[in-house]
Image (cartoon, coloured by chain):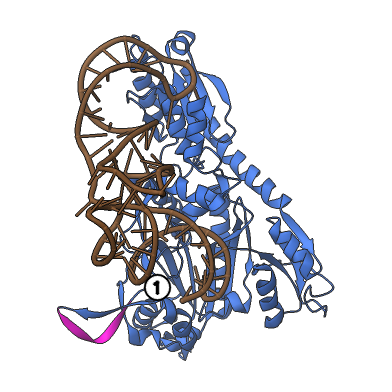
RNA sequence: CGAGGCGUAGCGCAGCUGGUAGCGCGUCGCGUUCGGGACGCGAAGGUCGUGGGUUCAAAUCCCGUCGCCUCGACCA
């Protein structure tokens, strides 16, 4: 018991010190290490495996929407950025620039991409000649660099991995539809694969992507009530198409300017998983993206037949496509239980002489920490059902918690009290920047997303007629 | 960049009324164990962030400097 307590103390208390808990989980479960350059992280195999699963799930969704993968250069001439005025202004403070190469100062500095609208826009202008070339939909998986002042593993790092999709269309309607379709794809993915419920909708002007006409977001609530922007989809209108000369001949033979979109999610999603599902024992991973879905822990491994039974079970589960690990190490079972729980493995099977004799296996769920006995002779179906149950349970639990933490407010005091209690606060807003700024100043909460389809009489700040209802929250 | 805090073994920490470095966990070896971090014995591992000063003597006192963390500011 003393040991048990000690283990818990290794990871900070989740309720008392959430930031420290998060850092502990990320480092001690071997997801990442800090990199040598401030704000960078080394993603370890266990952490990267989550990313690979995210990639697999997203790629299949992109492909079904006609999006193809491609790759564009890391270095972008600085002059490309200056072509779209708002874009360069928005990104300039956080762009890292290469000034020297080959032992000489470069005639033109090169930006390390913070995002690739400029280079992809340049290429699209060459690739697109005719309306027959549209729509064009490309995506790239890559790293980007943004020199942020403060950083936190996964949530905000100087360098991070992401996917950025870029599309070009013949009309505003089609581009807007694409923007919304990708937002819905992200939402479906977040809920079904990551078990993270999200609020989706438009961002305010203040929070809009530099150079976009409109930015749409999905916002997820972390366990401490703060919001995390988990993905964005931008409608770029003709802003980039004009700046980069993306033109095509229409079916009527006239030269037209295309409409473009861009959308992306990043390794920040891994941070979202940790902060949404994690508990005092460490990680809790949704089965769809868990590197290890099921771990088999042999009990009394020296007794005859135990190792063989475990290996047989492993082979059976593996053949059924379940990501299964057999923990053959000579640690004690209790040690293994804690270790794999900390690492968030959704289902653990304990298999010992008693179970083998009875033709059963003891299965422990990570999400609700309950053990159930299942028959060994139908292990695949039993485990698959259990995994599906965990996946479903995680989403429901997260959704319940989030819904319980959405409140309404009519004035500044209400917003302040709401966000301090760890809530998303819905409040009326007149639409002016001054009121939005004032809320941030006095409550540290920002406008996360428009609450579509809801209405309020008055603005919570100035008392004038409310044009919109906004979800306010403190954010990562 | 502002305000606080912290740098001592891989990790977490103690030592700070100056006297030449210790604990827990982890690691390695041997043995006994194995249904919730099991136990015994043995071993390896540290120029105390760094530079200077005071002193016979500095992890400890003084000054500088670097790095990290939290909260602000900043953040498609």
Q: Is residue A468 left or right of residue A146?
A: right
Q: Is residue A11 visible in this depiction of the protein?
A: yes
Q: Is residue A262 left or right of residue A401?
A: left
Q: Which residue is mark 1?
A: A114
Residues A125 and A150: in front is A150
Q: Chain of mark 1?
A: A
Picture quadrant where residue A314 is located: top left
Q: Position of residue A216 (x, y in %)?
A: 59, 69
Q: Position of residue B56 (x, y in %)?
A: 22, 54
Name the main secondary structure of what is drawn in magenta: strand
Q: Mark 1: give few (<14), some (14-19) or many (20+) Cα within 10 Å.
A: many
Q: Residue furthest bottom?
A: A254
Picture quadrant where residue B62 is located: bottom left
The chain in brown: B
Residue A21 against residue A445 in the figure, above or below: above
Identity of the residue drawn at 72% across and 62% down = A425
Q: Position of residue B65 (x, y in %)?
A: 33, 70
User: What are the residue bounds of the magenta stretch?
Assistant: A103-111
Identity of the residue drawn at 70% across and 61% down = A419
The hue used for chain A is blue
Q: Residue furthest right?
A: A457
Identity of the residue drawn at 33% across and 9% down = A304
Residues A221 and A151: in front is A151
Reply yes or no: does residue A125 show up in magenta: no
Quarter the C terminus of chain A occupies? bottom right
Residue A325 against residue A119 in the figure, above or below: above
Q: Position of residue B28 (x, y in %)?
A: 22, 29
Identity of the residue drawn at 41% across and 51% down = A51
């Amino acid at each position: 018991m003393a040991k048990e307590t000690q283990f818990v103390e290794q990871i900070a208390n989740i309720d008392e010190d959430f930031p420290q808990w998060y850092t502990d989980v990320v480092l001690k479960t071997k997801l990442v290490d800090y990199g040598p350059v401030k704000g960078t992280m080394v993603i370890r195999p266990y952490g990267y495996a989550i990313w690979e699963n995210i990639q697999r799930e997203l790629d299949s969704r992109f492909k079904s929407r006609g999006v193809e993968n491609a790759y564009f250069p890391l270095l972008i001439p600085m002059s490309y950025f200056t072509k779209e005025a708002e874009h360069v202004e928005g990104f300039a403070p956080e762009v890292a620039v290469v000034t020297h190469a080959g032992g000489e100062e470069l005639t033109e500095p090169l930006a390390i991409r913070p995002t690739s609208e400029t280079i992809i826009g340049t290429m699209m202008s060459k690739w697109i000649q005719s309306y027959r070339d549209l729509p064009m939909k490309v995506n790239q998986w890559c790293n980007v660099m943004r020199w942020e002042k403060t950083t936190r593993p996964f949530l905000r790092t100087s360098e991070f991995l992401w996917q950025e999709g870029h599309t070009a269309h013949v009309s505003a309607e089609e581009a807007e539809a694409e923007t919304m379709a990708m937002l819905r794809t992200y939402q479906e993915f977040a809920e079904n694969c990551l078990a993270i419920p999200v609020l989706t909708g438009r961002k305010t002007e203040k929070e809009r992507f530099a150079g976009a006409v409109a930015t749409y977001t999905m916002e997820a609530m972390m366990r401490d009530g703060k919001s995390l922007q988990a993905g964005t989809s931008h409608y770029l209108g003709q802003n980039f198409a004009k700046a980069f000369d993306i033109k095509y001949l229409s079916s009527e033979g006239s030269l037209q300017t295309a409409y473009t979109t861009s959308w992306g999610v990043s390794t920040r999603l891994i941070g979202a998983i940790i902060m949404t599902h994690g508990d005092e024992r460490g990680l809790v991973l949704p089965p769809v993206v868990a590197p290890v879905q099921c771990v088999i822990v042999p009990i009394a491994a020296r007794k005859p037949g135990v190792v063989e039974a475990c290996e047989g079970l492993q082979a059976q589960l593996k053949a059924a496509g379940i990501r299964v690990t057999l923990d053959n190490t000579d640690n004690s079972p209790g040690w293994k239980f804690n270790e794999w729980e900390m690492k968030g493995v959704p289902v653990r099977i304990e298999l010992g002489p008693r179970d083998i004799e009875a033709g059963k296996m003891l299965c422990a769920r990570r999400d609700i920490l309950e053990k159930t006995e299942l028959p060994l002779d139908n292990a695949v179906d039993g485990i698959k059902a259990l995994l599906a149950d965990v996946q479903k349970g995680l989403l429901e639990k997260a959704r319940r918690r989030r819904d319980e933490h959405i409140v309404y407010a009519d004035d500044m005091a209400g917003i302040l009290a709401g966000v301090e209690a760890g809530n998303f606060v819905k409040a009326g807003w007149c639409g002016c920047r001054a009121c939005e700024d004032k809320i941030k100043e006095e409550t540290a909460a920002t406008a996360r997303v428009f609450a579509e389809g809801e209405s309020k009489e008055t603005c919570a700040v100035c008392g004038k007629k409310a044009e919109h209802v906004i979800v306010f929250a403190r954010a990562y």
